[in-house]
Each structure stands twice: as structure tokens, then as C-alpha cells.
Amino acid sequence: MDKHYDLIALGGGSGGIAVAKRAARHGATCAVIEADRLGGTCVNRGCVPKKILWHAAEIAHALHMAPDYGFGGPSCTLDWAQLKIRRDAYLKRLNQIYQTSLTDFHVDIINGRGQFVDAHTLEVNGRRYHADHIVVATGGKPVIPDLPGAGHGITSDSFFALSSQPKRVVIVGSGYIAVETACLLDALGSEVSIMMRRLEFLNNFDVMIRRSLMEDMQNDGINIMSSIEIREVMRETDGSLTLLTDHDHRVTGVDCLLWAVGRRPNTDNLGLDAAGIAMDNMGHIPVDDYQNSNAPGIYAIGDVTGQIQLTPVAIAAGRRLADRLFGGQPGSRLDLENVPTVIFSHPPAASVGITEDEARKRHGDAIKVYLGHFTPLLYAMTKVKKRSVVKLVTLGIEEKIIGCHIVGANADEILQGFAVAIKMGACKKDFDNTMAIHPTSAEELVLL
């Protein structure tokens, strides 16, 4: 027998869970359709397992510095298999927490792949479910390039399934996944190279972040190969990979090839045509400011829309949509201005607002930039020094802060508080009038 709901979320990732729970809190009857583990990419193959490995890499950095602080004793070695076991156990607990929380909110969990039958009907495992409102929150998946032997490589999805640490790794890509993975593997002892078509990575970030990170990574021993493309991948008899590039260069003895060349939306085989849902040429579902697709009663949130691909953005979009549909808040919508973001590199980089280059394109001479370089106290006693860099981009006579960019230890934690101030419209004088906390790296932003 068919079942009817007020709202169905197609996809049990961060966005789908958020919209269903918030709608249920407002009294709506809701269901979430998911064929995989609850939590989506973030929990299972993204933010959470990545950050756990990042913490392991931070510990590795600390162990390298320990002798400079007077600590001796036997050296520690990483047990990759044990780390994976403990990490996977934690993720399994998170999956259960998501399931319990949905059940507690009386949200039905429908296991299987959903497909549109019409604009208000989805079919899962031969059974049909109807809803007045359907939210497509199916996320995205990594791209594998179309070239000979590409299947010998892995993606960020399968990276977390590795049962042993790869010793010689080539990462292809120039985005944050490539940079983050390169940094953590290098810190954990792998020999790492990055290959990219571009001259520099992280093209959407401020030039200060790009160049500071590139210098740090090269100083750490990461081999960055710019303006180069792989033409073919070959598996050798000893199991290693050989990479042939467009410059007739051969990279041999590769244990692991990781493709980090982008992601595309999970819109295949959803039956979107049956519901009259439009897609762009990349397969994304275009939405307006209120997450409406072109089809009435059908919405899209998260990576599937092609908007900013961050978990908190998907969650915020889902909650605001539910507030608008069921919470009596007709004006509720997602605000994509001044969204903070962090690259979990080593050291981390953090950014909110617009870049200096973009600011100058928009506003010309009305832009004033404040830049600071310093060595955090953490490295005062260490043989290896790592410098931090902070930048404020300001606009007009009042010097309203429209961009804040940080590279260095604790940048990830520092930015969250400053993002609040910038969201509220802080100007440079507001930072100047704020007392510094000494000695910290954060104080450098109020002392510029």
C-alpha cells in the first residue's frame, strides 16, 4: 500500500537529515530515503574521517617537535590498521546516532534507492511513497577522468577503505581534497606528489593562501608538479603504477594514485525527467534563493545544487527550507554571503569573505589590505619553523572588513569567531578596539 508524507528527503546525508528533522519538529510527517549509510559523504567518506586523519597528522607533527621541548624516549610509529579500526568504529557509532535521532523525531527511514514516478511520488524497492514536498539531497560523487588505465587509481571515497598506508602516493588535482590529503599523508610518513593542470592549486582562494601553503608543503617535502596532465596509467608486473604524462615524462613505482579532480552531482537514475525537474549541463539541479527547483513542490539542497559544497551550508539550507514550509517563516532562506571555510592542510588555512583580487576587481582603489607575517610561539623553540600569515581586506572610508584570510597553526579555530564579527559588519576600527589575548596567534588580527 502506498504511503503519504508531508515531506520526503531523497538522501540521508547532512542536508536531508537536517530538513526532515526540522520539518518533523514543526509537526510535519517526514521520511528520509537512503540506500547507503546515514550521514552521507561528510560522515562516511569526507569531513569526519578526514579530520580524524588530520588529527593523527597533527600528533605526528607534535612528536617531531617533542625533542625540541625536552621530551626524549622511544619514537612512536603509526599503526595505520589500528587507526582505521578505531576510526571506522567511531563512524559506525555516528551512523547509529543519526538513525536514533531520526527515530526520536518520528522520521521514517526508507532503505533503498528512490526514483521519481511523478512530481509527488517516489518509488523505492517496488513500493511508492507520496509527498506534498520532496527535497532532493543526494549529494555528489568523485570524478574519475576518462583516460587509459584511470581505473587503477582510487578516489576520496575509496581512500578511507585503505587497509594499509601507501608509501609512494601521487594525488591528481588542485582543490582542497588534493591539498588536504597530500598534507596528512606526508605528515604520516608517505612520499607524496601532487600533479595538476594549473600553475597553482586552490584557485578560488586568496593568493596569499595559495602561495603560503605551496611554500609550506614544498618545505615539508611534498613534490608539487604544476602544469602537467596524466595521459595513461599502467599497472606493472610488481603491482606498482606507472604514469605517463603529456610531457613524455614517466612517474614510476607509484603505490597509490588518488584522483581528486572534482565531483559531480548524484542525479543519475533519479527519474528527474518524470517529475519535470530541470538540470544544468553538469547535472546539478538549479534552485532559487529559497531552494525551489523549477518543479513546484520539489526542492534541492546541498552539493546536488552546485552551490557552496560544505556540510554546514547543506544543513543550514535544509533547516531554513523546513522553517519556511512548516514553521510559519515565509522569508526563511539560506544566506550565502560570508560563508567561512577551512582547508585542513598542515598548517590549516581559513577564509571568510572575498579574496583581495576579487575585491579589487569590484571596488578598485576603495580597497585597503592589511597583511601580517609572524612565527607562532609554538615554533620559538623548534628547529623547524613554520610562519603564519593573516590578511584583512577592507572596503571604503569606514574600512569595512569584507575578507579575512589566515594560514597557520589554529587558523581553523581562530576564524569561527572572527567570521561572526565579519557577518555582523565589523570594520577595521572594531578589530583595533578589541583587546588582544597574548600570547596567541589570534591576536595578530586585532593588532594589524
Image (cartoon, rainbow, N blue to C red):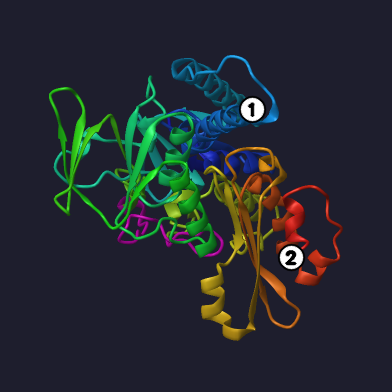
The image quarter containing residue 56 is top right
Distance from the alpha carbon under mark 1 to that under mark 2: 31 Å
**Viewer-side residue, 9 vs 120:** 9
Residue found at x 54% / y 40%: 14
Q: How many marks?
A: 2
Answer whether residue 142 is visible to the viewer in this image. yes
- State the extent of the magenta-drawn residues as a range: 273-294
Answer whether residue 6 is visible to the viewer in this image. no
Left or right of residue 180, residue 165 in this image = left
Residue 388 is a magenta residue: no
**Label located before the other in sequence (1 or 2):** 1
Left or right of residue 57, residue 443 in this image = right
Name the chief secondary structure element in magenta: loop
Please say if the residues under marks 1 and 2 sit with CB atoms less than 8 Å apart. Answer: no
The image quarter containing residue 113 is top left
Three-letter amino acid code at the position of disc 1: Ala
Left or right of residue 136, residue 158 in this image = left
Which residue is labeled 1 in the image?
66
Quadrant in which the N terminus is drawn: top left
Residue 395 position (above or below residue 350): below
Which residue is labeled 2 in the image?
448
